[in-house]
Image (cartoon, rainbow, N blue to C red):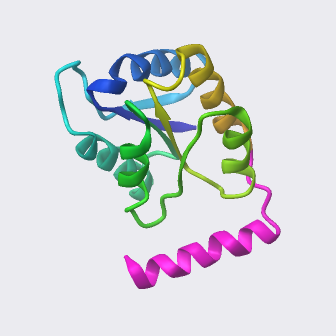
Amino acid sequence: MRVAVASDHGGFELKEKIKLHLIECGYDVVDVGTDTRDSVSYVKYGHSACEKISEGSCDRAILVCGTGIGMSIVANKHRGIRAALCTNVFMAEMARHHNDANVLALGARILAAPYAIKLVDVFLSESFDGGRHKDRVSQINEMEEVIL
């Protein structure tokens, strides 16, 4: 699986830890930035990661900012992106099982690194349940065609 990772300055350190973990686990990682602790806009980097999914060069993305809120908002502005801001394991599981989320947003100022990495592992290992949830995801996709 190919995974894009992105952060702003507030999420930089956590993104770097997640990136190393993913590489150690054998994932193909595409880091779209930032590569600095200097103040930058999360909008640019969240957008770049979502473009990787939209163009088909990445399967999923992990986005990190201070709270995860900004990154999740940016991500969900993209057609075909279903970003989930998760703060616990159950949310990460349900994001995959019920929503077929393809982007995980995390808050570096909210989560300790070991727990954030656990959420990443859950998010990347769980599958979509389909069934009635597939119908709902299809409804979201149809809505995107009208709105976006």
- Where is the N terminus found, in terms of image quarters? top right
Relative vertical location of residue 123 with respect to residue 108 in this rendering, above or below: below
Q: Nearer the viewer, residue 121 or 30?
A: 121
Q: Residue furthest bottom?
A: 146
Q: Kindly identify the residue that appears in the image at 22 percent across and 20 percent down.
A: 36
Tell me, yes or no, if residue 148 can be seen here: yes
In percent of width and height, residue 111 lies at 53, 23
Which quarter of the picture shows residue 49?
top left
Tell me, yes or no, if residue 26 can be seen here: no
- Where is the C terminus found, in terms of image quarters? bottom left
Q: Kindly identify the residue that appears in the image at 64 percent across and 69 percent down.
A: 137
Along the horizontal axis of the image, is 13 left or right of 127?
A: left
Along the horizontal axis of the image, is 59 left or right of 64?
A: right
Q: What stretch of residues is rendered in magenta?
A: 127-148
In percent of width and height, residue 33 lies at 28, 31
Q: Nearer the viewer, residue 79 or 58?
A: 79
In percent of width and height, residue 124 lies at 64, 36
In percent of width and height, residue 80 lies at 48, 64
Q: Nearer the viewer, residue 27 or 137?
A: 137
